[in-house]
Image: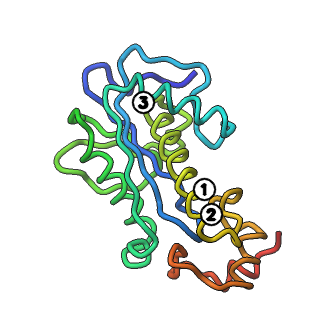
Amino acid sequence: MLHGHYTEELIEAGCDEAGRGCLAGPVFAAAVILPRDFRDEVLTDSKKLTAKQRFRLRVIIESNALAWAVSSVDAGVIDQINILNASILAMHQAISQLQTLPQLLLIDGNRFKPYLDIPHLCIVKGDGKYLSIAAASVLAKTYRDDYMDLIHEEYPGYDWKNNKGYPCKKHRTGIIVSGLTPYHRKSFRLAEQLKLQV
C-alpha cells in the first residue's frame, strides 16, 4: 500500500501529468487533495492499472477527495513552450482550480516551477509512493484517454482510440499516409519517430 501523506500537519495536493511522450493530443495534469483517512488497496501508479481499474478508481477518487481538478495544454502551446513547460503549466492550471488551497504540493517527477508561494516536493516515481499523486495520475490519464477517444472519431486513421497518441505502428503509418493533424505536436521530431522499429 502507498504512503498516505508526506506530513500529518499540512494540506497536501498530489500532482501528476499524462501524455508527455505522445506525438499527438494535449498533455493533461491533475491535482488531488485526499482526506487523511483515505485508503485504497488498488490505487497505485496509473500505468500499472488496467483501463477498467483506472475508470473505477476515478469515481472513487472524485467522490472522496477533498478537492480535485484536471487541466490540459494543447499541442499548439506545447510546440511554443516545449513539453516540459507545458506539463508544468497544466499542473499549475489544475492547482489553481482546486477549491481548497493546498499548503504543500507533491509533484511526480524531478522538475517543477514554484506555484505562488506554496512549497513543493518533487518525488521521482511519486505516483508509486503517495496516494495523492497516484490519484492525480489516474485522473490525468483517464481524462486524457477520454479526450483521445473523442478526437479519434474526428481522425480515425491514426488509431488514437488504442494508442492514445503514442508513437505506435498504426499511428506512425497514419502520419505517413495522411500527414499531420492540428492535434499533432509539430515540434516533436516526427521524422525520427517514423523511423522507429516496432
User: For residue 168, which quarter of the picture?
Assistant: bottom right
> Mark 3 is on which residue type?
Glu
Is 24 on the left or on the right of 31, as rendered? right
Is 118 on the left or on the right of 55, as rendered? left
Taking depth in this image into account, of 179 and 151 the one nearest to the observer is 151
Badges 2 and 1: C-beta atoms under 8 Å apart? yes
User: Residue 101: x and y, percent?
Assistant: 20, 36
Which dot marks residue 149? 1
> Mark 1 is on which residue type?
Asp
User: Helix, strand, or loop for circle 3?
Assistant: helix
Residue at the limit of the structure toward the left, as seen here: 117
User: Residue 24: x and y, percent?
Assistant: 57, 69
The residue carrying pointer 3 sits among few (fewer than 14), some (14 to 19) or many (20 or more) residues within 10 Å by Cα, namely some
The residue carrying pointer 1 sits among few (fewer than 14), some (14 to 19) or many (20 or more) residues within 10 Å by Cα, namely some
Q: CA distance from mark 3 to mark 2?
A: 26 Å
Quarter the C terminus occupies: bottom right
Is 28 situated above or below 30? below
Residue with the mark numbered 2: 152
User: For residue 45, which quarter of the picture?
Assistant: top right
> Mark 2 is on which residue type?
His
Residue under the image location 33 percent in, 35 percent down: 13
Q: CA distance from mark 2 to mark 1?
A: 5 Å
Which dot marks residue 62? 3
Is 57 on the left or on the right of 132, as rendered? right
